[in-house]
Image (spheres, rainbow, N blue to C red):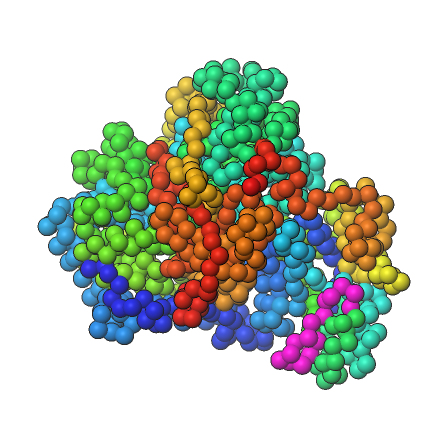
Amino acid sequence: MAVPSNQHFFIDPSRCIGCQSCVQACSECDTHKGTPMIHLEYVERSISTQTTPVICMHCESPTCAQVCPADAIKKTEDGVVQSARKPRCIACNNCVLACPFGVPKMNAGWELMTKCDMCYDRTSEGKKPMCATVCPSQALFFGTFAEIEALRPRSRPVNEFRFGEQLVKTKVLMMVPRGGLTEVVDVTAAMHGATPQRTVHLDLMMSGVFANAAEGK
Amino acid sequence: MATLPVDELKIIDFFGPHLAFMHGQSTDTAIVPDKLVKTHCCFCGQQCGIQLKVKGNDVIGFEPWEEFPFNRGMLCPKGVKRYLQGAHPDRLLKAIRRDPQSPSGFSPMGRQEAIEKVAAEIQRIQSAYGNGAIGVLSGASLTTEKAYLMGKFARVCLKTPFIDYNGRLCMVSAGVGNKKAFGVDRAANPWSDIVGAEVVWISGANVAECAPITTNYVWQAREMGAKIIVVDPRITPIARTCDLFLPIKPGRDAALFAGVLHLMIENKWIDGDFIEKQTVGFDKVAEYVKEWTPTKTAEITGIAEPLIRKAAEWWGTAKTSFLMHARGIEHSSHGVQNVLGSINIVLASGRIGRKNCGYATITGQANGQGGREHGQKCDQLPGGRDIFNPEHRAYIAKVWDVDEKEIPGPGVDAYEIFRKIDRGEIKGLLSLCFNPKVSLPDSGFVQRCLEKLEFYVAIDFFLNETARHADIVLPGSLQEEDEGVVAQIEGRVIKINKAVDCPGEAQEDWKLIQGIAKALGREKGFTFQSPREIFEELRIASKGGVCDYSGITYEKIEKQFGVCWPCPSEDPQGRPIDHPGTVRLFEPGTWNPIAKGAGPYYFPDGKAHFNVAAYSPPTEDVDAEYPLILTTGRVVSQFLSGTQTRRIGPLVNQYAEPRIEMHPQLAATLGIKDGDWATAETRRSSVTLKAQVVATIRPDTIFIPYHWSGAKTANRLTIAAQDPLSKIPEYKACACRVKKASEPAYVKTLEPQQ
Ligand code: SF4
């Protein structure tokens, strides 16, 4: 069976609470027991509790596969990019370095690149991926466009990402504020602080929230 | 003789905490489980529905239970990894007795022999010093059947008034506040009322880490247009993207609520009609908040005045709202006042008892709600009845088939039980589901008290830190090894189903308790054959009380995915009815056994009560010597005293050891960098931990999570000050100081979780 074509994966990092439920549940999967295939990143813990779950974005033209010298990374017909195939993978780390989203990880013990395959064992049987099922904040959501539309009036899905010159189109969708102009998430621009139309106070505790200035001393 | 039998490191060597990872059958990728058991998580008050995968007599994993409406498959990491507590190398498979000659400090003994020894010691102590020389400590992670049995066991079998439970550290300020304001102690609304509210006010609740599933309700409310106000000294994950963040100084919540009410009155953002018709006591409260001008409120709470004004305006002008709070405001020597302050702004708004107009405390423990309803509290009898009320006593005496005079009077709170031990008034202790050496404040005092006991018996599945002091430990049951009900966060009674049998000589806790009753020769009333039989008696015992379970059956629970109490079996005229349960309290026109139709609140006049919620500073405020505020709390991957979660490898790896959270500005003045060792010191004791330097905490406050033991326990530092009414300890604010340190000795001898 294939992943039903009306079911999509949506990520909303603004909802993420860093609980790692997704990572812990991933490691319970029957096909890779004890080892998670996804991870959680703190953006910058010293100033914020912002975290983001890193699952595979399942690119239309996967960079990881393009740079693989052993042709070990395959995509299913329904668009799921799989972990490297065991006999082919030479553990060269090309994919780990090349993926713009930082998804693949080298499992040193297995000498094999492993990454999220959107719980193919579950999704191809009509179930939701494990991480999106357990996620307590629903930062990871699996469902139809109609469902996300009804549930998330404040945001909308985008699936094109710009990394400098490279434009990447993904199967997995990222929720961005609805009012914004973004058609493409310009990742490298954001890295350089060039996010348009937004001022973000990172040190909120020091930005005038205390009753008097002496308070902070 | 409850001193440690041998060096604690040796006990740890044998009994842990050690870490369990996926092992045995669980690692087999081709395994097909024999069955999936629909039940609930064993940890927090959300009580997420979960399916346990069972193979043989092992729980080997989980599968989400997406049909259960509250969490629809969602789980936090604790729920995901909870199954790893089963088949654990530290599991107590036999009774053990204190034995200084044994390398581990304990030797195994037959279960029956152990039970008889326990009975003999109880008898010895009671004949030498009186019945009240035995104390009982119980817990709110137990099923309601067990909690009920513990209350009955203490009063009827042991004939001691001295029973209390670990909810004393958790729910009691909310309980007292709710009873004073509403006459009933339960979340007023279902969580579905959060979604659709215009304003969601969260005070002192690290929702994302301590009640993770609630996060989705809050986020969903915001999607539907709600503004989220979070009051906390730290920017917790739920605060990170809230609409209004009020960084309150720990222990100042009553002041904030008074200041908000002041502005509501000044701007006429109150529901005068509701106040007049549905409540009493408003005038006194209005008089009290007069002095709480925005300037004064800002000065005391440490929150900038414009933010207080904004919060009051949002709250005051909303049409619908939901206010929730948790331990942040309750763990205070003025916890009840803080709770009452929050209820006052709810009542003044008139937004309660309707859809999307809600108020609730977020329960902490699995059965934080059910565990506080049926008589294991020191002053309570089943059905939420009062032990000092003659009518209530008479009714329960009839159910228990004892003379009313035989039921002892009120006992004392859990901390006072330790003070009684200290004074030599209590000589023997029985504990179940309570680890006070980690969880009570000023834990050095708790240890000294334990050492004074003549006899201590603990019932547990692992040898927790307190049980290391025990003369005998009886091997009890894990949640998945027994059945029964619990009441979750919304007051919904749900069913815990048995997945596997107790291993070895371990036994269901209620059987162990009944075994002791039998060995004492006081078997009458303790011959239940199953949890269902206990539940049937509990239904009768609760009938006509505030927490009426008489219309609830195991079958109804399964059919409806839970039943919210009150659920009477008869209508007001005494005719049998099939009641679906009460999802939302205080709806206009509803009947309850206290008001008898006079109004929806649980007082004879049917009205809600305003109470003056006076502010006073924490018992131990900062000074030149101890200039910082210490506050404590949880992390998402650990639970309470860690007896279970510090044994689960993947959870320990997520956040292995406690750290001292501090603001960079404070760290700079102390010369401390992220990851440096630092010593936090209070008038009680000190702990040395690594510093976590983060800009997400007030610069005048440090935070330490409390789940660890021994040299790493935050509760060495905390103060044993208690709320005068609820007796909850003040975990959230005491004075401390911090200095840079070098690596402590324990690093070489202890693993992170030990
Ligand atoms: S600890 Fe609470 S939130 Fe986490 S899975 Fe268990 S019941 Fe759910």
Q: Residue furthest right?
A: A165
- Is residue B377 depicted above or below B643 in this figure? above
The residue depicted at 20 percent of the width and 46 percent of the height is: B423
In the depicted view, which residue is nearer to us: B347 or B558?
A: B347
Badge count? 0
The residue depicted at 70 percent of the width and 49 percent of the height is: A14
The residue depicted at 53 percent of the width and 69 percent of the height is: B33
Q: Quick check: is B258 in the magenta stretch?
A: no
Residue B464's quadrant in the figure? bottom left
Q: Is residue B432 visible?
A: yes
The residue depicted at 29 percent of the width and 50 percent of the height is: B445
Q: Position of residue B450 (x, y in %)?
A: 26, 55
Q: Quick check: is A112 in the magenta stretch?
A: yes
Q: Position of residue B594 (x, y in %)?
A: 38, 25
- Is residue B526 depicted above or below B411 in this figure? below
| Quadrant that contains the C terminus of chain B | bottom left
| Quadrant that contains the N terminus of chain B | bottom left
Q: Is residue B571 visible?
A: no
- Is residue B562 depicted above or below A76 in this figure? above
Q: Position of residue A201 (x, y in %)?
A: 70, 44
Q: Position of residue A19 (x, y in %)?
A: 59, 55
Q: Is residue B303 left or right of residue A87?
A: left
In the depicted view, which residue is nearer to us: B618 or B409?
A: B618
Magenta segment boundaries in residue numbering: A99-113
